[in-house]
Image (cartoon, helix red, strand yellow):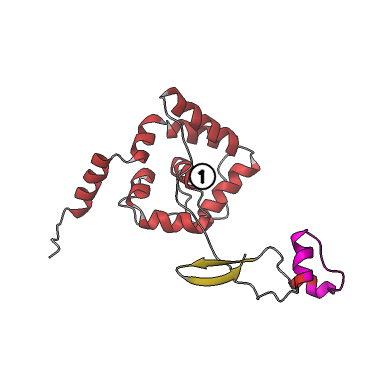
């Protein structure tokens, strides 16, 4: 029988601490306030003249951007992982928050960094802070994979040989060339075969 507890959330957090939550270690070693201040300096927050909901704090978005890069997550997967993972919620300071950034918020922040050409400098500053404490940030093991089905390809042996050589068969009409996904392959997921890219 499974026991219920009014303090289950606190007990899980304590267990995470005992097991060694790497994100908590990173939080102690990196000055995210300083990184956020630098982002605000080189890539100022957009004005609120047009209204809309208030933006999330820059420090929270810097932390989210770090997570997204460390674990190689798409915006959609980042939204899902923040909703799902206790360690991500703790790291972002959203454990008890009603509002969670969505995929568009992550995209908008990344665009803000891209336009200001600040992404590389931000990551280098974080790596420097970690290195001063004797740590090295490495990409995580979480994999974000989406299978996109495409129409099955019907090609002859001769056409397949040409495609392997990165050439297009001459007899294919322009419409055929646009519709053929020459990079799609067969793969298996959960025991089921898929053709896609």
Q: Is residue 119 left or right of residue 55?
A: right
Which image quarter: residue 185? bottom right
Q: Is residue 173 left or right of residue 6?
A: right
Residue drawn at (25%, 46%), measured in percent from left and top?
13
Look at the picture and state if 170 lies above or below 135: below
Look at the picture and state if 139 lies above or below 182: above
> Helix, strand, or loop for circle 1?
helix
Q: Residue 76's x, y, as percent?
A: 50, 59
Q: Is residue 13 left or right of residue 55?
A: left
Please give the residue where the numbered disc 1 appears in the rendered image: 69
Q: Residue 83's x, y, as percent?
A: 38, 57
**Magenta-colored span:** 158-176
Q: Quadrant of the N terminus?
A: bottom left
Q: Nearer the viewer, residue 9 or 109?
A: 9
Q: Quadrant of the C terminus?
A: bottom right
Q: Nearer the viewer, residue 63 or 70?
A: 70
Residue 82 visible: yes
């Amino acid at each position: 029988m499974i026991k219920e507890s009014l303090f289950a959330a606190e007990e899980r957090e304590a267990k995470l601490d005992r097991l060694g939550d790497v994100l908590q270690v990173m939080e102690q070693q990196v000055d995210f306030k300083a990184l956020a201040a630098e982002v605000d300096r080189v890539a100022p927050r957009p004005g609120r003249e047009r209204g809309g909901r208030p933006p999330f704090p820059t420090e929270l978005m810097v932390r989210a951007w770090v997570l997204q890069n460390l674990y190689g997550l798409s915006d959609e997967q980042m939204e899902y992982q923040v909703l799902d993972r206790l360690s991500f919620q703790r790291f972002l300071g959203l454990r008890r928050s009603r509002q969670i950034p969505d995929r568009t918020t992550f995209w908008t922040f990344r665009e803000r960094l891209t336009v200001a050409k600040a992404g590389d400098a931000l990551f280098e500053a974080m790596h420097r802070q970690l290195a001063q404490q004797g740590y090295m940030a490495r990409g995580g093991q979480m994999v974000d994979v989406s299978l996109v089905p495409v129409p099955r390809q019907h090609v002859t042996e001769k056409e397949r040989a040409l495609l392997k050589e990165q050439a297009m068969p001459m007899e294919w009409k322009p419409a055929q060339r646009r519709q053929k996904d020459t990079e799609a392959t067969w793969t298996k997921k959960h025991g089921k075969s898929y053709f896609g890219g």
